[in-house]
C-alpha cells in the first residue's frame, strides 16, 4: 500500500510517498481502517523533526484520520466492517491507505461529516474538550477566552464553548482569521499581533476578566493571561513554543492558576468521555470542523510546509488519501 513516511528526522523535505508498504492487520482490540483523509497537526511536525522522542524508522506520519472500517481484531465489539470512523491516534501511522488503531482511539463518524472533516476531529476536539470541560471545569455563562481561535484546537474550543452556553471571545493574527473565528462562535475577536488588544479583551468583560483562558501560545502570553483572568480564573496551557520570563507573584492576588494539558496521555476513562461527548456533538451539530487547505498524499510535504510557515491560521490542513 501507499504511505507517507520519513526515514530520518528533519524538515518537510524528509517526507516521501512510499509505495510498497505492507498492509497492516488488526490484533486484539484493534481496528483496521481504509483511510480516506488524514488531519495534519503540529504534533506530526514535531515527530517528523525528532522533537517528540524517538520513533521506529521508517515512520508513517499522522494520528488523526477518517475512513471506513475494513476489519476488526478479537475483542472489538463497538465497530464492524463498513462503519465510518475517525481516529485520534493510530498504531501503524494514519497517512496511509490503511491504518490499524487501538479501539480506544477510534470513534464513530456521523454521516453529516465528510471524511476530510472527520480527519480534523480527533486531536483538536478531544483537546478542546479536555481543556475546557475536564481541566478548566468551565460552565454555562462563564467568560471564556480562546487565545488563538483561528487554528485547529481554537475552532473546536470555540464551537464547544458556544454549544455549552459560555460567552466566548477569541484572538487571531489576521483579518481573515478574525472573521473566521467569529463564524465559529466567538463574539469578539481581536488581533494578537496588535498592540492594545489585551485591553480590548478586558473591556469586553467590563474589566472583570475571564473565568477560563484556553492558551495556544503560552510563551507569548502568560504575563497578559494573569491580567486577563478574573479572581480564581484558570488558564489551560495547550501550546507553548519557548521559554517565558514570568513572575509567579502576579498569580497570588486573584488566586489564578495555570494548568498544562496533554491529550496524548489521556486515560482510557477520559477517552470514553471525550468520545461520547464528541459523538453527541456530531449528532446535535456543534462539531463542525473547518478545513483551510487540502492536499493529496503526494503533496504531504506541502501540507507540512504550510503548517510550519503559515502567517495566519484558518482551520485545519488535511491530506486526502
Ligand atoms: P494551529 O492550527 O497551527 O493553530 C495555531 C493557533 O495559534 C492559531 O490560531 C494562531 O493564530 C495562534 N497563535 C499564533 N500566535 C499566537 C499568539 N501570540 N497568541 C495567541 N495565539 C497565537 O495549531 P493547533 O492544532 O490549533 O494547536 C495549537 C497549539 O496547541 C500548538 O502549539 C500545538 O502543538 C498545541 N497542542 C497541544 C495539545 C496538548 O495536548 N497539549 C494538543 C493539541 C495541540 P494565527 O495563525 O491567526 O496568528
Image (tube, rainbow, N blue to C red):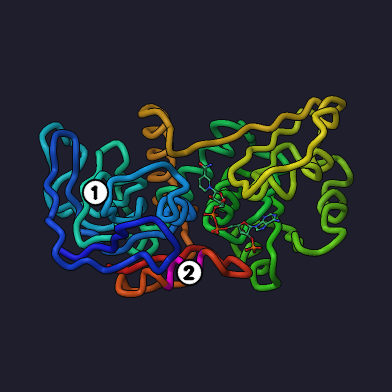
Query: Relative to residue 273, is residue 185 drawn left or right?
Result: right
Q: Residue visible at 25% across and 39% down?
A: 102
Q: Name the residue under label 2.
A: 305
Q: Residue visible at 41% across and 50% down?
A: 47
Which one is earlier in the sequence, the residue at label 1 or at label 2? 1
Query: Relative to residue 134, is residue 85 drawn left or right?
Result: left
x then y, percent, for residue 230: 81, 35
Circle 2 — which element?
helix
- Ligand 1's image quarter is bottom right
**In the picture shown, does residue 266 fall above or below 17?**
above
x then y, percent, for residue 270: 42, 30
Q: Is 305 in the magenta?
A: yes
The residue at label 2 has a CB less than 8 Å from ligand 1:
no
Question: How far is the residue under mark 1 from the one under mark 2?
Answer: 23 Å
Q: Name the residue under label 1.
A: 92
Q: Residue visible at 43% across and 40% down?
A: 277
- What segment is highlighted magenta in the picture? 302-307
Res 166 visible: no
Circle 1 — which element?
loop
x then y, percent, for residue 26: 14, 43
x then y, percent, for residue 276: 38, 38
For the residue pair 91 and 70, the one nearer the viewer reads as: 91
Query: Relative to residue 275, is residue 193 drawn left or right?
Result: right
For the residue pair 145 and 205, the one nearer the viewer reads as: 145
Q: Quadrant of the N terminus?
A: bottom left
Determine crowd level at label 1: few under 14, some 14-19, many 20+ residues with C-alpha closer than 10 A: many
Q: Is the magenta stretch mostly helix, strand or loop?
A: helix
Q: Residue visible at 66% across and 69% down?
A: 179
Res 82 visible: yes
**In the picture shown, does residue 184 fall above or below 46?**
below
Amino acid at each position: 500500500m501507499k504511505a507517507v513516511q520519513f526515514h530520518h528526522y528533519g524538515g518537510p523535505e524528509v517526507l516521501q510517498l512510499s509505495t510498497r508498504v505492507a498492509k497492516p492487520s488488526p490484533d486484539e482490540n484493534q481496528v483496521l481502517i481504509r483511510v480516506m483523509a488524514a488531519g495534519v497537526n503540529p504534533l506530526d511536525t514535531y515527530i517528523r523533526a525528532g522533537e517528540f522522542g524517538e520513533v521506529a524508522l521508517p515512520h508513517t506520519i499522522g494520528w488523526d484520520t477518517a475512513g471506513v472500517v475494513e476489519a476488526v481484531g478479537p475483542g472489538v465489539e463497538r465497530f464492524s466492517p463498513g462503519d465510518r470512523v475517525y481516529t485520534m491516534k493510530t498504531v501503524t501511522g494514519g497517512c496511509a491507505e490503511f491504518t490499524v488503531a487501538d479501539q480506544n482511539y477510534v470513534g464513530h463518524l456521523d454521516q453529516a461529516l465528510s471524511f476530510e472533516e472527520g480527519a480534523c476531529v480527533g486531536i483538536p476536539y478531544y483537546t478542546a474538550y479536555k481543556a475546557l470541560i475536564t481541566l478548566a471545569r468551565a460552565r454555562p455563562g462563564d467568560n471564556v477566552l480562546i487565545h488563538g481561535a483561528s487554528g485547529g484546537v481554537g475552532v473546536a474550543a470555540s464551537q464547544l464553548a458556544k454549544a455549552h452556553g459560555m460567552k466566548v471571545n477569541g484572538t487571531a493574527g489576521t483579518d481573515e482569521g478574525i472573521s473566521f473565528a467569529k463564524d465559529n462562535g466567538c463574539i469578539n475577536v481581536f488581533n494578537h499581533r496588535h498592540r492594545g488588544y489585551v485591553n480590548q479583551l478586558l473591556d469586553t468583560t467590563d474589566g472583570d476578566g475571564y473565568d477560563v483562558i484556553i492558551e495556544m501560545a503560552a510563551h507569548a502570553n502568560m504575563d497578559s493571561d494573569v491580567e486577563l483572568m478574573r479572581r480564581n480564573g484558570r488558564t489551560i496551557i495547550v501550546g507553548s513554543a519557548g521559554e517565558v520570563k514570568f513572575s509567579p507573584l502576579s498569580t497570588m492576588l486573584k488566586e489564578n492558576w495555570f494548568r498544562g494539558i496533554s491529550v496524548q496521555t489521556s486515560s482510557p476513562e477520559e477517552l470514553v468521555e471525550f468520545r461520547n461527548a464528541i459523538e453527541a456533538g456530531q449528532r446535535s451539530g456543534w462539531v463542525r470542523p473547518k478545513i483551510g487547505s487540502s492536499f493529496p498524499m503526494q503533496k504531504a510535504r506541502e501540507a507540512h510546509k504550510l503548517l510550519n510557515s503559515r502567517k495566519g491560521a484558518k482551520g485545519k490542513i488535511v491530506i486526502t488519501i
